Amino acid sequence: GASSCPEEPSKSKEALHELRASL
């Protein structure tokens, strides 16, 4: 989870973008 890995916020942002693109 993003909140679980605050050390790499860029990764969570990328994942969110990918998820939105998939939808």
Image (cartoon, rainbow, N blue to C red):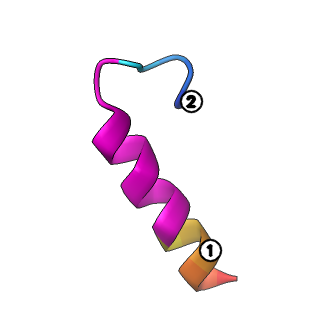
Residue 1's disc number:
2
Q: Is residue 23 left or right of residue 13?
A: right
Residue 5, labelled with which disc?
none
Callout 2 secondary element: loop
Question: Label 1: which residue?
Answer: 20
Q: Quadrant of residue 16?
A: bottom right
Near mark 1 (Cα within 10 A), the count class, few <14, some 14-19 or many ≥20, is: few
> With 22 as the anchor, is 17 left or right in this view?
left
How many numbered circles are shown? 2
**On screen, residue 23 above or below 1:** below
SS at circle 1: helix
Q: Residues within 10 Å of mark 2 (few under 14, many from 20)?
A: few
Residue found 56% across the figure and 82% down from its top = 21
Q: In the figure, 1 relative to 14: above or below? A: above
Q: Name the N-terminal-most of marks 1 and 2.
A: 2
Quick one: quadrant of the N terminus? Answer: top right
At label 2, the amino acid type is: Gly
Q: Alpha-carbon distance for marks 1 and 2?
A: 16 Å
> In screen coordinates, is 20 left or right of 5?
right
Q: Position of residue 11 (x, y in %)?
A: 33, 45
- Location of the C terminus by quadrant is bottom right
Describe residue 11's horizontal placement relative to residue 12 as left or right.
Answer: left
Give the residue at x 56% y 21%: 3
**Residue at horizontal 38%, vertical 58%?**
14
Q: Which residues are magenta?
A: 7-17
State the image coordinates of residue 20 (x, y, percent, origin top left).
Answer: 62, 74
Q: Residue furthest right?
A: 23
Rendered view: 5 above or below 22? above
Check disc 1 and give the amino acid type: Arg
Percent x, y for residue 13? 43, 51
Look at the magenta stretch and give its main secondary structure: helix
